């Protein structure tokens, strides 16, 4: 399968952004984070793990984007479709790209307002002190009118293909969990082993792995693993965000170690029912809260409980939240997770998750949906 | 080896911060990013991969830190030494923790200035729109007077122990690179295989892996791998940030595939000499620019070239930069990388990297220093 996208895909994204910018009266967008910059350029590197250097992309109201980046990134950016690449020797203790960025913004958006993603899930990836300097240099910043969030929420077929592949990779790794987990195995060894399986099955990398284990589930789903050994009767959950070519899957699987208790089986059955109910509701025009409602009434989730799913794509989680409070309207091409959780006893949960894409009609399953009874390993 | 730190380590960190806050006349620090919050709490999770929720920690001018976090993190935060944990049901489309945070800041720092890390390498991990709301609620924000950067730059022995272990894990994996790399192997398969080796040797996870290959080196050191097969005579470089218990190693190794060319060997010799020269200079009281100079004169780096090393710890790169421009003074307990690169022909480089900790006297080697001729694999 080919990596990257056709240049036309990037041109289409820029054109859509520019139409929205025109409506919002923005002279440019200024982007500073990994997914925002990758969305328009295809610039893909794990180097973002280093916080030392800021990176900037400017999408002007017409014409191609301009990259204002540390010189260490010039060679890789030159391999993308971006032609106007301006660099400085970063990190610089006094002027870390600020004057070059200001000059470029003045040139590309003279007198115009510069939109910054400023709403839910966003942040400005540059030092606040440097942002203050830019403002003092006369750049007129405002929010991006939600343009980036709206653009990224609906995936192209080429993007969906990558997510589908990431899901398939994880599916093959989940099929092999019995190789690395069983009675007596320390949870941290299981985590390491499962990451190895994901890589063997074709993941480029594994930015996210969480999980837990216990007879009736786990207290939370974000903790790192420790040396606790798995015990017969535990329910083990592994939840991964594995990546292929910059796109995530995000789903989990639960396994009973040796045997499944009737209470765990009962909870499992409710979780499958909840996902099935959500699938029935997840149609273009439905609201995120409708999909939440379909699951919540089966698993007994209250309105202030955690969300039961979310958008998915270039990031592990992005876009809408399946909560009682989120009125986002589903559109064709949105990729979301269905992630019902059920409390088995006070403070312990079992959580199940699948990935779908909204279609005209029933959603397409991207993860290989679980069915039947709770899988038992090491029996 | 024990995970985490004794509570006393966190208390000491808070006490040091509070002394500096008093000098800087700050009523509180507000922290929003993963390493900043982990530094004072020990809150360790890969869940930061999800951008959906902001997280806040307040260090008041006296007393223990207070966490203001999404409820999904309450169980894990309760396992740290932090006792005052305030939560909200996130993500919330209208008030995503802002009023709870404002109320807590008003309570903990009434009328006082709230310091935010604002200089090099920092960012504010919350939506700009929400930051504006906080300001409108009367919180007086200023910068943190560089307190976080100074505190984190010098590592405790307990921190150094973790970095040493991460380095040892990577060392064992580098010793096995011949198992996954050789003539004809696609670079992307080598990357996957090397990540597997790191996990097998005990890494908790592998947030960073970069590299390149070519007869006289590589055009950059941040590109992802592609399907290009290794050829006899290539120099393969693998550069990893592998993590154990939340602390990184960051060093690379170069390998000649089948045979090493005389020009590659010559470059390699200069790189070893450069690291040795840097080791002689890296003493308490020396400046980052002095260590840069020691390497630059051997590898022929110009003043505007990339840096030749950097600080290391909870992040892949943090703190000082070994450049001509960085006047940071080395102190005992600082962990840094020595990362000389040399241009072999126009646009191609070989880069070598080791990790050390500054001691009273010669630095301690944390990575198992390379020596001798360029290692050949698949001969």
Image (tube, coloured by chain):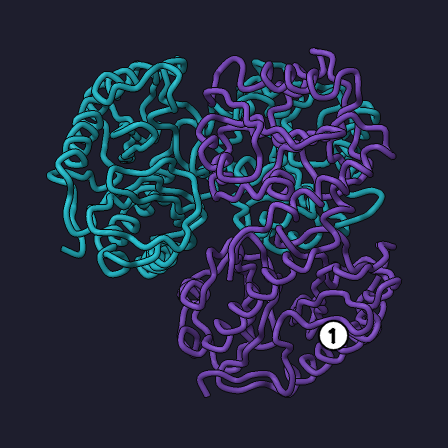
Chain colours: A purple, B cyan
Disc 1 crowd, CA 10 A, few/some/many (<14, 14-19, 20+): many
- The vertical placement of A313 against A46, above or below, is below
Quarter of image, res A227 = bottom left
Q: What is the chain identity of the residue bearing mark 1?
A: A
Q: Is residue B341 left or right of residue B371?
A: right
Question: From this viewpoint, is residue B163 visible?
Answer: yes
| Label 1 sits on residue | A275
Quarter of image, res A84 = top right
Q: Is residue B348 left or right of residue A366?
A: left
Q: Position of residue A51 (x, y in %)?
A: 51, 33
Foreground pick, A233 / A68: A68
Q: For the C terminus of chain B, give its image quadrant.
A: bottom left
Q: Position of residue B177 (x, y in %)?
A: 25, 55
Q: Position of residue B86 (x, y in %)?
A: 72, 45
- The vertical placement of A315 against B145, above or below, is below
Q: Position of residue B189 (x, y in %)?
A: 36, 59
Quarter of image, res A335 = bottom right
Local secondary structure at mark 1: helix
- Residue drawn where x is 34% and y is 59% of the image: B193
Question: From this viewpoint, is residue B59 visible?
Answer: no
- Residue drawn where x is 68% and y is 23% of the image: B114
Foreground pick, B31 / A293: A293
Q: Is residue B221 left or right of residue A56?
A: left
Foreground pick, B350 / B170: B350
């Amino acid at each position: 399968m080919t990596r990257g996208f056709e240049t036309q895909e990037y041109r289409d994204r820029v054109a859509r952004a520019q139409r929205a910018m025109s409506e919002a009266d923005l002279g440019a967008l200024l982007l500073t984070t990994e997914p925002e910059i990758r969305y328009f350029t295809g610039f893909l590197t794990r180097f973002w793990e280093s916080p030392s250097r800021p990176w900037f992309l400017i999408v002007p109201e017409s014409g191609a984007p301009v990259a204002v980046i540390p010189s260490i990134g010039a060679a890789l950016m030159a391999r993308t479709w971006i032609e106007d690449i301006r660099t400085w020797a970063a990190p610089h203790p006094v002027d870390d790209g600020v004057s070059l960025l200001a000059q470029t913004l003045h040139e590309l958006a003279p007198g115009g307002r510069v939109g910054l993603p400023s709403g839910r899930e966003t942040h400005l990836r540059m030092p606040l002190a440097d942002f203050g300097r830019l403002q003092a240099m006369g750049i007129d910043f405002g929010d991006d009118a939600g343009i980036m969030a709206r653009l990224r929420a609906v995936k192209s077929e080429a993007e969906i293909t990558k997510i589908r592949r990431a899901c398939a990779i994880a599916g093959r790794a989940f099929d092999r969990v019995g190789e690395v987990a069983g009675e007596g195995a320390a949870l941290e060894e299981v985590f390491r082993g499962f990451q190895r399986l994901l890589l063997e099955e074709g993941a480029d990398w594994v930015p996210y792995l969480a999980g837990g284990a216990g007879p009736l589930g786990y207290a939370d789903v974000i903790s790192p693993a420790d040396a606790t050994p798995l015990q017969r009767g535990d329910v083990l959950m592994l939840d991964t965000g594995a990546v292929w070519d910059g796109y995530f899957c995000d789903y989990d699987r639960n396994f009973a170690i040796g045997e499944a208790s009737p209470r765990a089986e009962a909870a499992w059955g409710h979780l499958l029912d909840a996902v099935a109910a959500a699938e029935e509701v997840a149609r273009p025009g439905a609201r995120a809260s409708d999909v939440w409602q379909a699951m919540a009434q089966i698993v007994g989730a209250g309105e202030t409980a955690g969300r039961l799913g979310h958008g998915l794509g270039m990031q592990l989680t992005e876009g809408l939240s399946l909560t009682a409070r989120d009125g986002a309207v589903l559109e064709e091409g949105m990729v979301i997770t269905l992630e019902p959780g059920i409390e088995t006893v006070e403070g312990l949960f079992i959580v199940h998750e699948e990935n779908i894409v909204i279609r005209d009609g029933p959603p397409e399953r991207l993860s290989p949906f679980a069915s039947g009874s709770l899988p038992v390993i090491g029996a």
